[in-house]
Each structure stands twice: as C-alpha cells, then as structure tokens.
Image: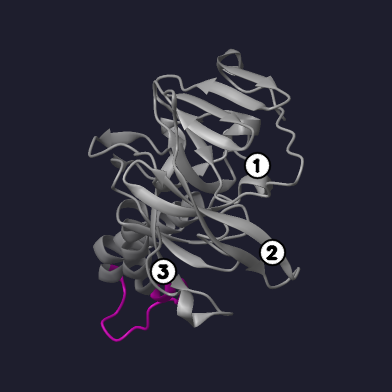
Amino acid sequence: MNFALILFLLLLATGLIWLVDHFWLKNKRAADAKDPWWVEYGASFFPVILIVFLLRSFLVEPFKIPSGSMIPTLLVGDFILVNKYTYGIRLPVINKKIVEIGTPQRGDVMVFRYPDNPSLDYIKRVVGVPGDKIVYQHKRLSINGKELPLQKAPEYLDKERLFYTPRYVETLGNTDHDILVETDAQSVIAPTVQFPFRDKCHYNSSGVTCEVPAGHYFMMGDNRDNSQDSRFWGFVPDENIVGRAFFIWFNFGDLKRIGSFK
C-alpha cells in the first residue's frame, strides 16, 4: 500500500473542497445556513491532513519493524522514527531529490524501497557506499581490503525460541554496533533475483564479493544469518532511499526499548 500516495490524494480532495467552499459556495449560502456535511468534514480535515503530509514527507516518518533481520539493534514490534531530510529533500510520492543535504554513511541504519518491489519498505544497515569493494567471506566482513574489527560480546538470547546466538560488536565507519553471527551454522549466499549490476558481484562457497556502483549502496542486516539483503538481491539505488532511522519511539511489549539506538 502506497500510504504517501493515499495521503496526497486525500490532501488534494479536502483542499479542493476547502477552496471551492471558501471562494465560491460559501458566498451562495444564506448567512445562517448550515454547511453541507461534505463541506464540514472536508474543510475540517484539510489542515490536519496538510500538517501530517508535510511532517511525514519532509521531517519524520514512523515505521514498524516487521522482521528480525536487524536483531539485536531493532526487534520485531519496535516503532521507529525515520529522518526524511538527512539524505536530501525529496518530492513526496515520486521521491525525487530536489535539495542535496547529505549522503548515507557506513553504519547508518536506513529505510529504503526494496529494489525488486518498490512498494515494500526495507530497513538495513549501510555497509558499502559508491566505489567500495565489499567482501563477505567465511562470515567476516571486509571493506576495501580491511577486515572490520569484531569484539566478542555476551550471547544474545532469543526469548521466543529460547536460543542463544553469538553476539559481536562490529566497528563500521564511526559506529560500533552489535551483530549476531551463527558461527557454527552453514551459510549459503546466492543471488535470489537477477538484479542490476549483477556482474559486479561474484559468489562462491565461502560468500560474496561486490563492487558498489555509483549512485548505489550495499545494505546488510545486523542479524547476519537471518537477513535477506544486498548479498542476495543486489544494490539499493539512491532514488529508493526513504531516510535514516534514528529513534525507537514505542514498543508495546517492552517500554524500556524507547530511545535511540546505534
């Protein structure tokens, strides 16, 4: 569902009702006449929809985490806020950038439209920026020939499955963040779709090596063995970017999760 398009159409409809009533119909009604129901509702909803549309399009947008691909950073059921202007101001609905402000940096947690189906919003961590050489072999990540440092952390307990997973602190850019890696589990990485710039990725039994093309980004989930990401379906083009996730504003199951994250 394209909520931005629905909101835009509602804005147009209620705005048109307000304009027609304010500049034409209102003058034709008797002073003591009651407004028609469609005028009353349309005119009253217009400013509310306008404020929501502007906030959601240019400042912040709420999202709910639907899967466990970003565990332990983000859990299923987390409600997060996404900064819509960090990576530039974009026109609503068509998502065309009109003002350049910044670009995604390694380590950012980013919401984007899934390249193979732009109606779906995905959230992953930026691992590679244009020009980077990404190597993920034997469950270790290297960028431009340098293997990212890992520090062992306490194991992560999946409370639903009652299953412990090895946890590490990974340093990516200026960000230290937790990742989960099932070191004893077999990991098979293979492309799931024929994505653009497929020739820039090379797969083998140990993992994948990719060169990030201009205007694209390489994304990975923090739950490394349970994330469908750029290793499988390719690169995220700049025009698919929605914004940078920066705050957990609610979780019905755990109020302690409210706050920022890495």
Which mark identifies residue 80?
A: none
Q: Relative to 232, does residue 56 appear above or below in the rendering? A: below
Q: CA distance from mark 1 to mark 3?
A: 43 Å
Where residue 37 appears, as percent x and y from the top left, is: 46, 77
Quadrant of the rendered image containing residue 148: top left
Foreground mark, 1 or 3, reads 1
Q: Are marks 2 and 1 in contact (CB under 8 Å)?
A: no
Q: Residue at x 57, y 39 (%)?
A: 114
Q: In the displayed structure, does residue 68 sit left or right of residue 29?
A: right
Q: Are marks 1 and 3 in contact (CB under 8 Å)?
A: no
Question: Residue pushed farthest bottom?
Answer: 32
> Neighbour class for label 2 at 10 Å: few (<14), some, many (≥20)?
some
Colour pattern: one colour
Where residue 259 appears, as percent x and y from the top left, is: 38, 71
Q: Residue at x 32, y 35 (%)?
A: 97
User: Tag 3: residue type?
Assistant: Gly
Q: CA distance from mark 2 to mark 1?
A: 21 Å
Q: Toward the viewer: 87 or 178?
A: 178
Residue at the spot of label 2: 164
Which mark sits nearer the N-terminus, 2 or 3?
A: 3
Residue at the spot of label 3: 42
> Neighbour class for label 1 at 10 Å: few (<14), some, many (≥20)?
some
Q: Toward the viewer: 204 or 65?
A: 204
Q: Relative to 58, does residue 105 appear above or below in the rendering? A: above
Q: Is residue 59 visible?
A: yes
User: Tag 2: residue type?
Assistant: Tyr
Q: Which residues are magenta?
A: 28-42
Foreground mark, 2 or 1, reads 2
